[in-house]
Image: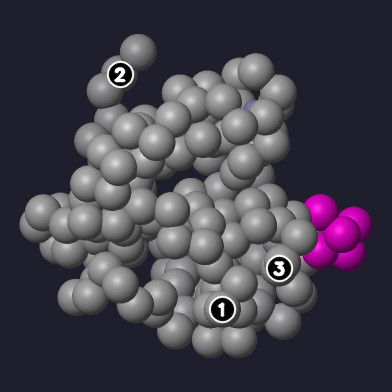
Amino acid sequence: MPIVARTERQSLGDWGEKKVSELCFCPSCKRSKTMKLLPPNFKCADLICDFCGYLSQVKTCTVVDVNSIPRQILGAAWEPQRERMEAAIYFSLYLVLSLKDRSDFSIYFLSKDLQEDAMFVPRKPLSSAAKRAGWQGYLLQLDNVKGRFVRLFWSAGQNLASLGQSH
Ligand SMILES: [Zn+2]
């Protein structure tokens, strides 16, 4: 297989997905180390639990403060998201916030049960001059759902140590 160079944004995404799969328990079966990365071109989700099949999405963002959820973040393609919402299908979301140099990060979780249509906001389709002319993405508007996130890990995962001792 040819090795395709990943863009900076993609490699940030890969890093965030890896952190979640290493650190987080499966929200459904509660096992650890069972969340596996799906192939990069897999459309609806980023991780699958190889014990119970639970699917989740991971979004990774560079921020200046890893303790504050951004007002909005980039989503993906709008059309499949719109169709999923029509079918009332949502995927739980892990949000990885990292400093640019990745020296600190935190991981937040938003359950699929706490998501609503209004947080998915379509963007303008790309102009005809663009490489992917007509392609339309969406934004995740997090302002109104901020309070529904759970913070799982912070201080670059250092809070794991105390969790480990209590088990
Ligand atoms: Zn599971």
Q: Horizontal placement of 124 versus 78: left or right?
A: left
Q: What amino acid type should be assigned to the residue bearing mark 2?
A: Pro
Report the amino acid beneath label 3.
Gln
User: What span is in magenta?
Assistant: 85-89
Residue under label 2, please give it: 2
Specify few, some or many for label 3: CA neighbours under 10 Å numbering under 14, 14-19, or 20 or more. some
Dot label at residue 115: 3
Q: Looking at the picture, how far across and down is residue 84, in whole percent?
A: 80, 57
- Indicate whether residue 88 is drawn in magenta: yes
Main SS category, magenta section = loop
Q: Earlier in the sequence, mark 1 or mark 3?
A: 3
Helix, strand or loop at mark 3: loop
Q: Quadrant of ligand 1?
A: top right
- Quadrant of res 145: bottom right
Residue at x-position 46% and y-position 69%: 74
**Mark 1, residue position:** 147
In this view, the residue in front, 30 or 10, is 30
